Amino acid sequence: MSLRTRLLILVIAAMLVPAILVGLRFVQNRTSEIDAAQANLAASADDIAADLDEKIQGTAQLHYGLARARDLDTRDKAACSAFLSDVREEYTQFTGILTIDPDGSLFCDSLQTNRTLDLNDRGYFKQVKGLQDVVAVEPVFGRLTGLSVLQIAYPVRSEAGALKFVLLASFNLNKFAEFHDKRLLAEKNILLVDAKGTILVAPKSGGWTGPVGGSIAGSDLFRFAAAPDGEPFREVTDREGRTQIWGVARSPSIRKAGLYILVGRSKDRLVAAANRRLYEDMAILAVALLLLLAGLWILTTVSIGRQVGRLAAMAKSLGRGDLSARIPEPHPGGELGGLMSLLNSTAESLEQQRAAIADLSHKLSQSQKMEAMGQLTGGVAHDFNNLLTVILGNSEHLADRLAANKELHRIANDIATAAERGSDLTRSLLAFARKQPLRPREIDIAEQVTGMKQLLRRTLGEHIESSFTFAPDLWLASVDPSQLATAVLNLVLNARDAMPDGGKLAVEVCNASLGESDLDVNGEPRPGDYVMLAVKDTGAGMSSEVLGRAFEPFFTTKEVGKGTGLGLSMVYGFAQQSGGLVQMQSEPGRGSAIRLYFPRLATPPNEEPLPAERVTAPNGHETVLVVEDDDMVRAYVENELKALGYRVITTSNGPAALDVLRQTVDIQLLFTDVVMPGGMFGPELARQAIRLRPGLKVLFTSGYSQDPVKTPDGISARILTKPFRRQDLAAMLRSALSGMPRESGREP
């Protein structure tokens, strides 16, 4: 058995019995004190109710005597009031004593107010008119004094039984409650409410917030008080979270009078004594624990201090980054020896990983350099294709003209062959620059991401927690799977770099319907149905300035040599090329969220381009509008078209071509480059041209790829890839003008 296990057993054995005894004592004391206090509260409430019942009976005896006094059997209001005033001075528990005529009007009162009051609406008056030799009782607020009183009414009748007047004594409930509050030494709260829940007397302590005259109707406390045969006490928590225990008087006569007497006390004060004893026990337990820990400390220092020192030295070496440090043999047995061996093996593993990371860093730097070169080669290949178009076309023209001279004819053919080899080279450059055509397929994006889980988790590392959430019934999308995988990997790598100290990464795929208010990173609305792929992290986040430039090529916030700034720009370009959009949210210190939206698939895409067909192209006679920004290419195309019998009009940009279309009527075909300066590319030019000339045919030419050009809806166009031969040009012209299947490339 190891030393750590022995120490753990000693601690448990030393602490278990005291802890159980302390817990049992606390529970027992707390329960017994609460039970005794609850019973005492209900008993106190019953005592107060019994005392009040005696006061009511005493008042009834007083009424019986006053009913026979000749001083009240008079219509002299002043004399009657003076007599009642003298009586009231003898009985100070009453706020007032008065007489009421049978019609409900006040006749005389001990306060000698000489006021006129109609008391027909009072419940006690309605009740007392039907009684004989007994009193009617009702708790109210006195109309003369405004104080909470218990009205005790007695009917005074003639010998014939007719009602002569009603004697009314207003018993002061405030003084009554104050008397009992002093008797209870202010340790308990007294609350008096009527049958409607109106507060007649409120507690003066204990944090009670309800005002006199307020209502507790509908509260747990009132439901407890009004319950006819409920429990004698209950715990009630007020709005401030304070818990009190209330007892209620169950006296039938008092409850029949419409008065509820409650006595309460704070629950915390009830258990204060038990808490004090608990603190004492805990102090004793703490002292015992300190003594035990001191003994264990001494034992640990003597027995394993040296070995721990060796471990600490190893940890400091690793903390300084010295992965070559090792704990020398021999190692002790047990857990400490195992930990030393583990640290040695961990240091060795980290040293190997550092070497591997250095190698990967070198490879990554090289890869990033190649990516940057790709941006340059793509542009160079495009311009080179323009030059090759002129070289290849003119070499063919020379070969035709020099057919009689075999030597020169061979040289012209060699030039054409060299130009075709140059075309092969530009296609390789375009593939390196990732301007090769996308190969979209009908895929389930969630299924594609699922297949990448293991790769992504290995890429993130163990210090980052990852989660994947896929909504049910996902739509299909037409996306290039390999490019999608590259985009997801780029986003995950960026998220990892933003969380060097660890964090959480979430990948989510769901359906999304965007409206006019949903904007992409360019601030433009892109309404429609999409499949949304989101990558969220809890990293450092970005400021608004950095967020505005995040998708710019070569923009990066990383250190020199740590990145090219092409990752997000490649993701943006892929989403745009796939017909989708990008949204991004980020705040400093709150992480980032990047959402890619791919259009919902309406019809499955064609998997492979249609095979090219060779057709024999006769010469033409139609008028062709040529739009080409490169002067040499434009001149070559113009000459070739004229040689083929076409009428030709040339311009160098889109706006100039639109001006020609507005002025010239007889134009059958628009032959335009795809990428041109001036802000208007070929597809946009075609869209506006078709709007001006609905029957106009369109033929595109491009030096980038054989991928179909995405033209606006409703426009049927073909593409001729640069460089091209004369026969390809002639065939595509006839195919475009006649509406036949294209000769080279695919219909967009």
Image (cartoon, grey):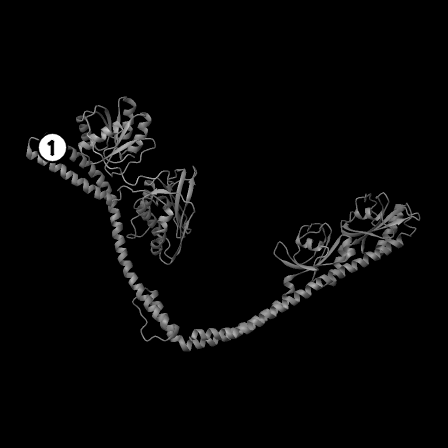
Residue 341 image point, x, y percent: 34, 70
Eyeballing the image, is 625 above or below 86?
above
Which quarter of the image is occupied by the C terminus? top left
Element class at badge 1: helix
Q: Quadrant of residue 308?
A: bottom left
Residue placed under numbered mark 1 in the picture: 399
Please state if 139 lies on the left or on the right of 290 as rendered.
right
Q: Residues within 10 Å of mark 1 (few under 14, many from 20)?
A: many
645, 505: nearer the viewer? 645
Which quarter of the image is occupied by the N terminus? bottom left
Residue 69 image point, x, y percent: 91, 52
Please state if 47 lies on the left or on the right of 549 as rendered.
right
Please state if 221 lies on the left or on the right of 505 as rendered.
right
Residue located 78% across and 47% down the image = 143
Residue 626 image point, x, y percent: 24, 28
Q: Label 1 amino acid?
A: Ala
